[in-house]
Amino acid sequence: MKRPLIYLLLCIPLCIFSQQYSDYLGAGHSNGIKVTSSHQESRTNWDEIALDDNTINGTGLDARLLETSRFLAQATFGTDLNYIKAVSENSFEDWIDAQFDLNSPSMGELTQTIYDQAQDRFVANGGNADDYFGPFWVHFQYAWWDSNIGNQDMLRQRIALALSQIMVISSNSNVGDYGVGLGDYYDVLKDNAFGNFKNLLKDMILHPMMGIYLSHYNNPKSIPEQNIHPDENFAREIMQLFTIGLYELNQDGSYVLDGNGDRIPTYDNDDIKEFAKIFTGLGAAEVMDNPWGVTAEFGVNHYLAMKNVPMDMYDEWHEPGAKYLLNGVVVPNGQSGMQDIESAIDNLFNHQNVGPFIAIRLIQQLVKSNPSPAYISRVSAAFNNTKGVRGDMKAVIKAILLDEEARSCSWIENPSSGKLIEPMLRYFNVVRQLDLNNDTSENWNVGYNFYQATGQLPLSAPHVFNFFLPAYVPNSEFAAAHLVGPEFEIHNSASSIDYINEVDLMTFPQYYSVLTTWDLEMEGRALDFEALNYYAKDSEVLVNQLDKLFTRGQLSAETKQIIIDTIDPIVNGWNEDFEYTDLRVKLALYLILISPDYTILK
């Protein structure tokens, strides 16, 4: 695009009465300055005009827009350009505060509602209601996607997904048959995302889906003569994976070392046994209607238990006696089972490790894989005490997202900065940031093809250790630099190519729908490229627009030129079956989405 020659005329008399600037001219510092030009360009089929005043009045400068795009890439699953522009007009803290005030509908209730609707549709198409299975994991996926397209509670949903990868249950297990239970467990994470971590711990402990998944549902007291002893599974994982980790930590996440320079374990096998005693006696609080007359009591098979009602304590099945917990804490003999659980929660919640443990994992989920010790320490401090409160999740979230290490551009080129965006987040971004061809209000998605390709969907980790380990080191170069790359654990020769194939299908929706359903009678949902077609009249304009949405203004000059050179030859008449702008959009989007500029969040 040729730029007209611009002549700037400084009108001295006007400047006498205008605000004076000693730093620079332009970017909005234009009071009292008159601009004239030889030409103000407008182009056929474009709404924009190259106005002379725009050379210095700040119009068109995208720095704040790109900062906002990057912020929202950390704090949400993706937003469209209009939303990014709206957020850019105020402070990020204002946006966070507004998000704190938004409530979310119940995912468990929505899962049941969607199942009922799907069953009705199945029957209306000639099926037998008894042949329609569920609600199971498919209906939870429908509910998750329906809740996360076009919604406003974006930060809460983002934090809930992050927590789901710390306090893991998975549909890739025996709990996959219980869709309402999956949704209700997600509600525990979502509803506590802006609350207190201590309450989150209690609700997670008592949830029947966690009880079934990690086997403290119907966990009995010791009966030595029958060789029955408390199950230790949950006791181990609540320490190792959910709260304190394996080794003692300083506030900045570094290891506490003993006199020999060795790490100090946070617990041993005896501690596991003591905590296992705590988590005994929990069973079904309610059971579903059944023809066998079974009522709620300890020992009822989990199949009959209501999965959206917290477990009850059956004290006659709770391990009696004192329990010896961490840091010399003794739970006294004679307490009720729930009092024992409250004591154990206090013991874990007040452990010095919890602040840095949770800080590291949430920073890794939201911002970067290798936070500095100072960043970890600042977030840990927010966890440990914000206005006299320990465990305030709102304070933790603000500390993570507003920290200078998350916000300052000076960190972007630091070798420790950045993270590989996990495949499902790349997927969510595309679906949220582009319009969908959707004539209905339903956005149900089973996501099964994407799951087969990448191994990822919400609440579908292969095991309790999540999709990847937080301390995973991809190769010797990472090891030499003392860096980790958690998401690289699922980035391999198969999943990387399969992801590219999924992107190829997403961007050619005449062959494939970006949202697909298990219910064959429902149509899928494809991406709608119409809004982007407007910009595709100029290859560079299109790529710049995609850069704002998907690469946070960080598209490298090399990648940008490759894409422009690739799509520029696609002109009107190039293919008689498609509009050339449509083809440009699809190919440019494909190349953006498989580029390192998109897949790495800096």
Image (cartoon, grey):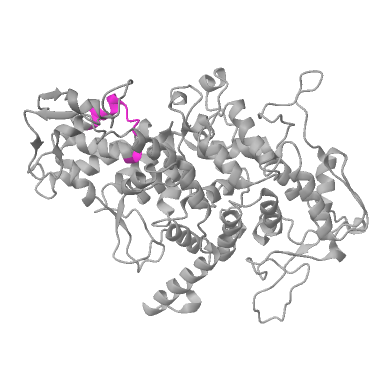
Is residue 468 visible in the rendered image? The answer is: no
Is residue 558 part of the magenta span, yes or no? yes
Q: Position of residue 474 (x, y in %)?
A: 52, 28
Query: Is 502 above or below relative to 149?
Result: above
- Taking 249 as reference, is 64 left or right? left
Q: Residue drawn 42% across and 57% down?
A: 151
Relative depth, front residue between 516 and 321: 321
Q: Residue at x 85, y 47 (%)?
A: 274
Q: Is residue 428 something that shows in the picture?
A: yes
Q: Nearer the viewer, residue 353 or 570?
A: 353
Q: Nearer the viewer, residue 449 or 81?
A: 81
Residue 208 in picture, x, y percent from top left: 67, 61
Left or right for 453, reference 342: left
Q: Which residues are magenta?
A: 549-563
574 lies above or below 527: above
User: Can you say which quadrant of the picture contains the N terminus?
Assistant: top left
Determine the main secondary structure of the stretch shown in magenta.
Answer: helix
The image quadrant of residue 73 is top left
Residue 150 place in picture, x, y as percent = 38, 57
Say left or right for 553 vs 510.
right
Q: Is residue 503 magenta?
A: no
Residue 221 in which image quadrant: bottom right
Quarter the C terminus occupies: top left
